Image (cartoon, helix red, strand yellow):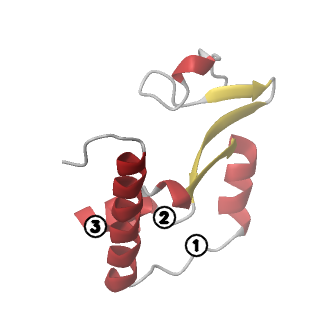
Amino acid sequence: MERAPCDPEKRNTSECRVYQITSHCFEDIHHHEWPARDYKTELEKEYRELHILKTLGCRAIHNEIHATTPPPQKPTVAEMREAVNQDRIEKLIERSQNGQSTT
């Protein structure tokens, strides 16, 4: 399947979810917590979407990871809640240091 390259300024937006890195490699997002179908609740989905649990990389490598590696063990609800809360705190601290409103 071929995909047309998109504007690098629009990477990872709804207009450009896949960005061509080279002629045979398209960049996309790999979630370190998978499969997606195992993350159903709002907390689980929010946890899975944390920036620290996603990386950008070549789709071919992404496919290889899923084909050769078993999914990671799903964290407990308490672990997910802690990670989500920590991320929220870090974002609040970052905003306050940048002089942005935290409300």
Q: Position of residue 93 (x, y in %)?
A: 39, 57
Check disc 3 and report the residue beneath it: 43
Q: Amino acid at mark 2?
A: Pro
* Residue at 45% from the left image edge and 28% from the top image edge: 13
Q: Secondary structure at mark 1?
A: loop
Label 1, label 2: how far apart the Cα atoms are:
7 Å
**Quadrant of the rendered image containing residue 76:** bottom left
Could you tell me if residue 39 is visible in this image?
no
- For residue 71, the mark is 1
Q: Earlier in the sequence, mark 1 or mark 3?
A: 3
Q: Secondary structure at mark 2?
A: loop
Q: Position of residue 98 (x, y in %)?
A: 42, 42
Q: Position of residue 12 (x, y in %)?
A: 51, 32
* Residue at 81% from the left image edge and 23% from the top image edge: 23
Could you tell me if residue 53 is visible in this image?
yes
Q: Residues within 10 Å of mark 3 (few under 14, many from 20)?
A: some
The answer to whether 60 is drawn above or below residue 41 in the figure is: above
Q: Position of residue 85 (x, y in %)?
A: 33, 69
Q: On the picture, is 13 further left or further right than 95?
A: right
Check disc 2 and report the residue beneath it: 35
Q: Amino acid at mark 1?
A: Pro
